[in-house]
Amino acid sequence: MTDWNTRTKLVHSGSRRSQYGEMAEAMFLTQGFAYDSAEQAEARFLDCGDDEFIYARYGNPTTRMFEERIAAIEGTEDAFATASGMAAVNGALFSFLRPGDHVVSARALFGSCLYVLELLAKFGVEVTLIDGLDLAAWRANVHPGTKAVFLESVSNPTLEVIDIAAVAVIAHAHGALVVVDNVFATPVFSKAVQLGADVVVYSATKHIDGGGRALGGVICGTRDFVRGVAEPYLKHTGAAMSPFNAWIMLSGMQTLDLRVRAQAANAQGLAEALEGHAKLARVIFPGLPSHPQHATAMAQMGSGGTIVTFDLAGGRDAAFRFLNALEIIKISNNLGDAKSIATHPATTTHQRLPEDQKALLGITPGLIRLSLGIEDGRDLIAEVLAALDAA
């Protein structure tokens, strides 16, 4: 299995079949499991094997298929599936940090990730926020007391691309774990583990499902971290993924590579069509040579990804006129869907950030985050250009 290529792993890795030999992954909708004897129950609680289960909050055959499949394509020893992407972020950090520990994080984060860091600070963890693009800032703030560094490999929504390899060298020199939120990079383009990430988290709600159907998240890492550190915290605090949602994720993964590559091609085509447009103050896309971290993006992902961000010169009013002129592209706050989605971060996903923080992160009133789907790219370009005329 380790020699299989990505698309093969996405279809077959982690598969378990019952005595019926079903082709589709079986959905084990059960919260508990029966034992043949009291002795067997005792033995399982003492030492639960890889293919043995106790309770759905601890593990489930369907969920385990999903965990093994995502670990196989991410290149990690193990994975733990969570109820949502934010449960994965919370679990990855809260499971091992203690009062008095120190975390250094890039400040360009999704609003809920910033909230988790605020919670850590309330519980006595020292949190330092820095410009993630500034390697000198990482060097100046990571020290022997630092237990973890945290970053989005591609930031939401302004698409800053942090040099994971360089940050990992700085962190590991002081014994700190490198925790990477890798949603925008997607498992298809991810090289996070090869670049030095110790723990990789995903919101499976996004590209992994790909159909906007279910919430889910996952923590990928070494077996010692996943089973020895993250699992005890997650199973006792109740963040486990539903077996039904795991079944949906398994279905989505079969087409993940095909979908993401089509989405990335659409994103590249749209970004190229928009660059230099008179109504746009800027077009942000890592796949454009004009992007400040274009070389880093190509080295880390080999692609610009599936998200294009642009800033309408007319501000909020122009952004709203643009959004309201869309037909194929839907206004929503999700991303990574097979359907194209447009988001106005300043009034939705990042609405609660103070204005000075929005300004610091480049989240302007005219900023639009566009998640490209798998529709015909020609239709998407025509629609966006027409909506810009309306704006």
Image: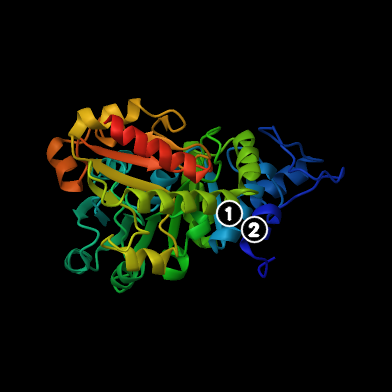
Quadrant location of the N terminus? Answer: bottom right
Rendered residue at 37%/38% (across/down): 384
Q: Is residue 272 left or right of residue 280?
A: right
Residue positioned most to the right: 20
Is residue 55 visible from the viewing direction of this image?
Answer: no
Reading the image, the residue beneath label 1 is 257
- Whether tag 1 and tag 2 are in contact, CB under 8 A, the answer is yes
Name the outermost residue toward the left. 356
User: Callout 1: helix, strand or loop?
Assistant: helix
Horizontally, residue 287 falls left or right of residue 254, namely: left
Task: Choose between 272 and 317: the one closer to the eye.
Answer: 272
Q: Is residue 389 left or right of residue 331?
A: left
Q: Residues within 10 Å of mark 2 (few under 14, many from 20)?
A: some
Query: Which comes sooner in the sequence, label 1 or label 2?
Result: 2
Is residue 16 at least partly visible in the picture?
yes
- Of residues 295 and 185, the one drawn nearer to the viewer in this rendering: 295
Q: Which quarter of the image is occupied by the C terminus?
A: top left
Q: CA distance from mark 1 to mark 2?
A: 6 Å
Q: What crowding class fits label 1: few (fewer than 14 Cα within 10 Å), some (14-19), or many (20 or more)? A: many
At x 61%, y 43%, the residue is: 252
